[in-house]
Image (cartoon, rainbow, N blue to C red):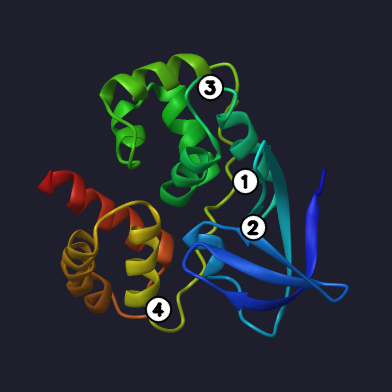
Amino acid sequence: MIAFVSGTVAALAPNAAVVEVGGVGIAVQCTPGTLSTLRVGKPARLATSLVVREDSLTLYGFADDDERQVFELLQTASGVGPRLAQAMLAVHAPDALRAAVAAGDEKTLTAVPGIGKKGAQKLLLELKDCLGAPTGTPAVGAPVTTGWRDQLHAALIGLGYATREADEAVSAVAPGAEAAGGTPQVGQLLKAALQTLNRAR
């Protein structure tokens, strides 16, 4: 089990980072929120979870140990694999997922691509005694310093939306993001974009 990787960020992609550890580049699948905290050439430490399949070894990276733990707990529910668990964490912070499960909030879960009403009801039942109560930790939402439009677009494509849908969602949230002033946060923008896409369907 690889519990974490620590090293210099060698490259960033829409859904992954390459961290150089002892001269070896390790590819780590990450959520948009985690990726937005990383900078090429800068040091990083990511909590990780290794998913072993017959034909692949995939390392998933997280901002902290809590996010990794929730990622692993989500997969104890039937029908939830690493991709769906990561999509859930791309849309909601760990505490938001705990709160949704504790409150039986279907709407929060159906905001995640790939989860319908029936799937949300099933997840609420299976995860009820698993995730625990919200811890009160603030959501990790690092400011997007450059090219928030590109990062948001790439995140939506990574979640399985078509280019046209991603374009429309970015355009829909742009006025609000720019009017708010300051630096937009990728996690909040992604949540808003997914809401516009769910309304459009």
In terms of sequence position, does the residue under pointer 1 or pointer 3 come before the other? Answer: 1
Is mark 1 in CB contact (under 8 Å) with mark 2?
A: yes
Could you say where residue 163 lies in the image, as x and y percent from the top left? 24, 64
Which numbered mark, 4 or 3, is in the foreground of this view?
A: 3
Q: Which mark is residue 67?
A: 1
Could you say where residue 29 lies in the image, as x and y percent from the top left? 59, 57
Is mark 1 in CB contact (under 8 Å) with mark 3?
A: no
Residue at the disc numbered 3: 77
| Image side of residue 130 versus residue 65, left or right | left
In the foreground, 51 or 38: 51
Quarter of the image holding residue 5?
Answer: bottom right
In terms of sequence position, does the residue under pointer 4 or pointer 2 come before the other? Answer: 2
Q: Quote the CA–CA distance across marks 4 and 3.
A: 36 Å
| Image side of residue 43 versus residue 34, left or right | right
Q: Residue at x 54, y 42 (%)?
A: 94
Residue at the disc numbered 4: 183
In terms of sequence position, does the residue under pointer 2 or pointer 3 come before the other? Answer: 2
Vertical placement of 57 versus 150: above or below?
above
Q: Residue furthest left?
A: 200
In terms of sequence position, does the residue under pointer 4 or pointer 3 come before the other? Answer: 3
How many numbered marks appear?
A: 4
Vertical placement of 44 versus 187: above or below?
below
Mark 2 neighbour class, 10 Å CA radius: few under 14, some 14 to 19, many 20 or more = many
Q: Quote the CA–CA distance across marks 1 and 4.
A: 24 Å
Is mark 4 in CB contact (under 8 Å) with mark 3?
A: no
Question: Which amino acid type is marked by label 4?
Answer: Thr
Question: Which amino acid type is marked by label 3?
Answer: Ala
Looking at the rendered structure, the secondary structure element under dot 4 is loop
Mark 1 neighbour class, 10 Å CA radius: few under 14, some 14 to 19, many 20 or more = many
In terms of sequence position, does the residue under pointer 1 or pointer 4 come before the other? Answer: 1
Q: Residue at x 18, y 53 (%)?
A: 196
Q: Which mark is residue 63?
A: 2
